[in-house]
Amino acid sequence: MRATDDDTPSDDTPTRDDDSGRDVRTDGGLDDGGDARTDGGTGDETVFTRTSDVPTLTRREKARRTFDRRIYAPLAVLVRDWRAVVGGTILVTFLLTGLVAWVSASNWWLLESVVLVEQPSVMEGPIFTPPFQSMAYPLGTGVMGKSIFEQLVHAAPAMIQMILAGALLSVTIGTLIGTVAGYRGGAIDKVLMSLTDVVLTIPGIALIIVLAAIWEPRSPLIVGLLLGIDNWPRLARTIRSEVLSVREESFTEASRIMGLSQFTILRRDIISNLMPYISINFANGARTIIFESVALYFLGILPFTTLNWGVMMNEAYNGADLTNPSQLHWLFAPMLTIAVVSLGFILFAQGLDRIFNVRLRARHESTTADAESQ
């Protein structure tokens, strides 16, 4: 291989003789007739020399790869996991039930005449009808002759609003504070963790009862936000501990050396590796919101402004004879619904854990399989 003009030594460049008698530059370059540099490289190579031909992807190929990684591979992992299928089916059914209730009760002019499930009304049927005795009242009726099935359907929108508001608030605040405190450290860590400890020491249920007594929240969204205040400190503490270990990993250090911004590092290297833990905590947070809201409504602490499972249990507890087995279905129906929806959150969270497994996702990416087969 011939040397380039830049490698040609000047007249005053020091040289020495090698074993074969050729002149070799002591600065690592080539002499006029040399073949190699003393550092093992060749004369026309630099640190920016391309050593392999990497094909440039077209816009269509990029779109296909993005679809494959973001949508196809996660769905392929989900459908192969029975826990994700069962949990997802339960949650989708729950959301569709809320949608049916919303459409049936909507006053929007396009949906005003659409009634998929009638709203429960007093004395629409005989009192204490047992379940599975009539198609008009598949789950039976209560003391006022209201259909329990219709009550469960129309209680779904309020429960969905409380769950989403409370779980999203607690996960968002806990993840944000825990991530920033663990990654930045120093004074920011001390301030954020001191704030977390202060909130953690406050009795959550007592705080919610006081706030509910002062403001009397009537919207399910406000109730969910109040319940979410109590749930974020524990998540922030555990997220911070995870970040302290992830920030010392080699890939995080490589991102810092490459000069990536802190936002990019937190999003791509820190939070993406904590997503299994965050998703599981979202499911646990949703279950906590369900239990706390139902308990507060059941005890009569929160005002009965909307129909929900806690209100149903309160009415069943006060209106039914609990020693009479023929009336217990009124109380068991919302209790069984709570248990099934909670199970759906747990199973779906375990399925999400597999989605964020990098090896499993890579195994189900069709573009990766195509590349390996070539």
Image (tube, grey):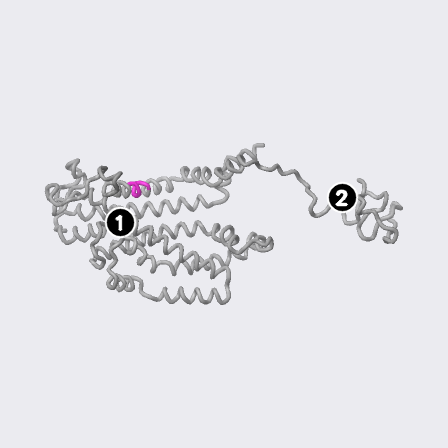
In magenta segment, residue 94? yes
Name the quadrant of the N terminus.
top right
Q: Amino acid at mark 2?
A: Asp
* Residue 94 rendering spot, x and y as whole percentages: 29, 43
Who's the residue at 42% across and 52% down the image? 278
Compared to residue 282, the image places residue 153 above or below, namely above
Q: Which mark is residue 158?
A: 1
In the image, what residue occupies the spot 47% across and 41% down?
Answer: 70
Q: Position of residue 227 (x, y in %)?
A: 31, 57
Which SS class for mark 2? loop
Query: 63 or 353, which is in the foreground?
Result: 63
Percent x, y of residue 363: 50, 38
At 65% across and 38% down in the image, what residue appears?
A: 53
Q: Mark 2 or 1 closer to N-term?
A: 2
- Range shown magenta: 92-96
Which element type, helix, strand or loop, lies under badge 1? Answer: helix
Q: Residue drawn at (48%, 65%), measured in percent from left and top?
A: 188
The residue nearer to you, when weighing 373 against 148, is 148
Residue corresponding to mark 2 = 44
Q: As displayed, is residue 171 above or below residue 83?
A: below
Q: What amino acid type should be assigned to the residue bearing mark 1?
A: Ala
Few, some or many C-alpha atoms within 10 Å of disc 1 (few <14, some 14-19, many ≥20)? many
